[in-house]
Amino acid sequence: MKALLLGMLGVYRYAVSPLLGRNCRFHPSCSEYAVEAVERHGAMRGGWLAFKRVGRCHPFHPGGYDPVP
């Protein structure tokens, strides 16, 4: 499961993300955060942390530095 998630994130980061530009309001970017969260915490918890992070990525959130716990 972990390898599948990392593979999907890799495809997104190298095929889709360049087309969208650098719009992330967080550092590290949401995709970098997701990869680090899945590598550090595994598929379930890392996927949940990434899901919560993407949920905070909207125009009304100030963004900023938000490392993986």
Image (cartoon, rainbow, N blue to C red):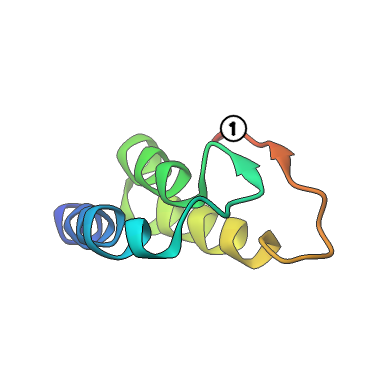
User: Does dot 1 land on a helix, a strand or a loop?
Assistant: loop
Image location of residue 4, percent across then percent down: 16, 61
- Residue 45: give x, y in percent of width and height: 45, 53
Please state if 48 lies on the left or on the right of 15 as rendered. Answer: right
The quadrant where residue 27 appears: top right
Task: State the count of labels.
Answer: 1
Q: Position of residue 65 (x, y in %)?
A: 68, 32
In this rendering, is residue 5 above or below 30? below
Q: Mark 1 points at which residue?
A: 67
Looking at the picture, how far across and down is residue 62, in whole percent? Answer: 82, 49
Q: Quadrant of residue 59?
A: bottom right
- Say what amino acid the circle numbered 1 marks: Pro
Badge 1: residue crowd in 10 Å (few <14, some 14–19, many ≥20): few
- Residue under the image location 53 percent in, 36 percent down: 28
User: Residue shown at 66%/49% (left/top)?
Assistant: 25
Which one is in front, 61 or 3? 61
In the picture, the quarter occupied by the C terminus is top right
